């Protein structure tokens, strides 16, 4: 393929994003945070419970949860993306996760009754997190699919990470479909960035590296990655650390969040600092590995990629797996919320969630009605997206 110049990026990135979103209803849902909130607020008589003012993910779908390693190497499933994080209503995370699970169930050709059971177990898992001390998180039974992914994560090595991310175990990033050349100003800015003391300290924090270890930028490229974020600044940087250690750093632009925030909530004005603070509050294992800074007059956040950091890929699920996964992932999200609440706030929020339960369905009316409404709107939006974009692209 022809490698685009920096001036040619935007058009190609938008085309790639539209094509990715046309691959399936779930891919469309994952890449369309803007439409999610537009749909949500256009509902007639729409009413969600008013949760406590805490940091929320803001884009809590399946692709944004997965195994993460902390600075000591411990691995567990956590929320792993905070581009949309704000201090807002935790009900938004719960509903976004419910919609994601419902569309994943449809992609797995599961009958509608399974979605009903999934939402029942989702609310049960979330409420369980509000009742559970954070220290007992590891005692919660994990679905078999999650166990397999975590075992795989624990076994992964630097070579596997390099092969997956840069398609090369040698100390070089090769240009191609996912990595594009940098402009001269981008190259210079990256070299200057990794001369900063706070960035070097971030490099040496992990793996107990010596603070005096020599850190050198070997290679860097514009990274074509993600879906809804395609078009933002994104870079992969390959570093040598000391004699025989290598690592890959991810530099990502932070922009204004679409997720609604509580009006009087006090958050960092700088978007990169907002992302890092949200991560530290909700997923300390990741937040402690991140830093916010400026890059070419843009706010960015930086983190080292570890072999243990994986997405949960749930292309096909059985009925039992789908139901168990709903409960477990809701529990993970609930723990991220609950760690920010005192006992009284947890109790009050849990009681609020118990309202509006019917005798025939243990799912709160607001959650069930919202998911049904959003699924219908989502399906129409997806088909319209395919009509507008996918048919114009090669291969459709």
Image (cartoon, helix red, strand yellow):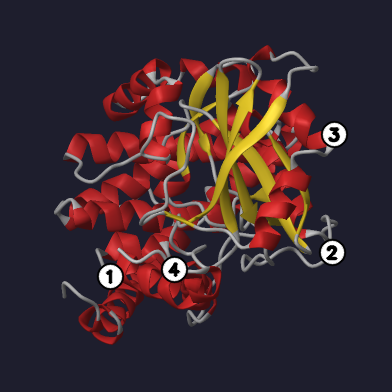
Q: Residues within 10 Å of mark 4 (few under 14, many from 20)?
A: some
Decide which of tag 2 and tag 3 comes sooner along the chain: 3
Report, in whole angstroms, how far the alpha carbon at label 2 lies from the one at label 3.
35 Å
- Residue at x 53%, y 51% (from the top left corner): 221
Is residue 106 found left or right of 344 in the rendered image? left
Circle nearer the N terminus (2, 1): 1
Horizontal relation, residue 387 to residue 330: left or right: left
Q: 289 or 138, which lies in front?
A: 289
According to the image, label 4 marks what residue? 4
Query: On the picture, is 295 further left or further right than 176?
Result: right
Q: Which residue is mark 3?
A: 197
Name the outermost residue toward the front: 184
Name the front one of labels 4 and 3.
4
Residue 207 shows in this picture:
yes
Q: Position of residue 335 (x, y in %)?
A: 58, 33
Q: Quadrant of the C terminus?
A: bottom left
Q: In what element is the residue under mark 3?
A: helix
Q: Which residue is mark 1?
A: 22
Q: Which residue is mark 2?
A: 264
């Amino acid at each position: 393929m022809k490698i685009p110049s920096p001036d040619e990026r935007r058009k190609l990135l938008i085309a790639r994003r539209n094509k990715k979103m046309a691959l399936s209803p779930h891919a469309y849902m994952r890449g369309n945070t803007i439409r999610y909130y537009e749909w949500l607020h256009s509902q007639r008589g729409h009413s969600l419970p008013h949760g406590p003012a805490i940091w929320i993910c803001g884009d809590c779908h399946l692709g944004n949860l997965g195994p993460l390693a902390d600075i000591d190497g411990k691995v567990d499933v956590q929320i792993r993306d905070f581009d949309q994080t704000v201090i807002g209503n935790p009900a938004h995370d719960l509903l976004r996760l419910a919609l994601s699970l419902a569309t994943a169930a449809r992609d797995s050709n599961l009958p509608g009754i399974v979605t009903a059971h999934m939402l029942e177990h989702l609310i049960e898992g979330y409420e369980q997190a509000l009742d559970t001390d954070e220290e007992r998180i590891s005692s919660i039974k994990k679905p078999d699919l999650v166990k397999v992914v975590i075992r795989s994560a624990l076994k992964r090595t630097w070579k596997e990470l390099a092969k997956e991310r840069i398609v090369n175990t040698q100390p070089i990033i090769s240009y191609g479909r996912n990595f594009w050349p940098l402009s001269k100003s981008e190259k210079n800015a990256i070299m200057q960035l990794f001369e900063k003391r706070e960035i070097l300290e971030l490099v040496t924090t992990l793996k107990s590296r010596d603070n005096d270890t020599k850190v050198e930028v070997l290679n860097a490229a514009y990274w074509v990655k993600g879906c809804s974020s395609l078009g933002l600044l994104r870079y992969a940087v390959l570093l040598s650390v000391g004699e025989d250690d290598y690592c890959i750093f991810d530099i990502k632009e932070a922009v204004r969040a679409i997720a609604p925030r509580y009006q009087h909530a006090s958050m960092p004005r700088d978007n990169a600092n907002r992302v890092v603070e949200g991560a530290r509050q909700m997923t300390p294992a990741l937040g402690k590995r991140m830093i916010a800074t400026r890059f070419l007059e843009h706010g960015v956040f930086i983190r080292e990629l570890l072999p243990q950091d994986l997405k949960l890929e749930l292309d096909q699920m059985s009925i039992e797996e789908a139901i168990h996964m709903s409960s477990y992932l809701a529990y993970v999200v609930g723990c991220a919320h609950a760690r920010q609440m005192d006992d009284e706030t947890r109790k009050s929020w849990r009681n609020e969630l118990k309202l509006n339960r019917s005798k025939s369905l243990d799912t709160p009316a607001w959650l069930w009605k919202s998911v049904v409404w959003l699924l219908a709107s989502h399906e129409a939006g997806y088909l319209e997206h395919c009509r507008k974009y996918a048919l114009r692209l090669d291969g459709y």
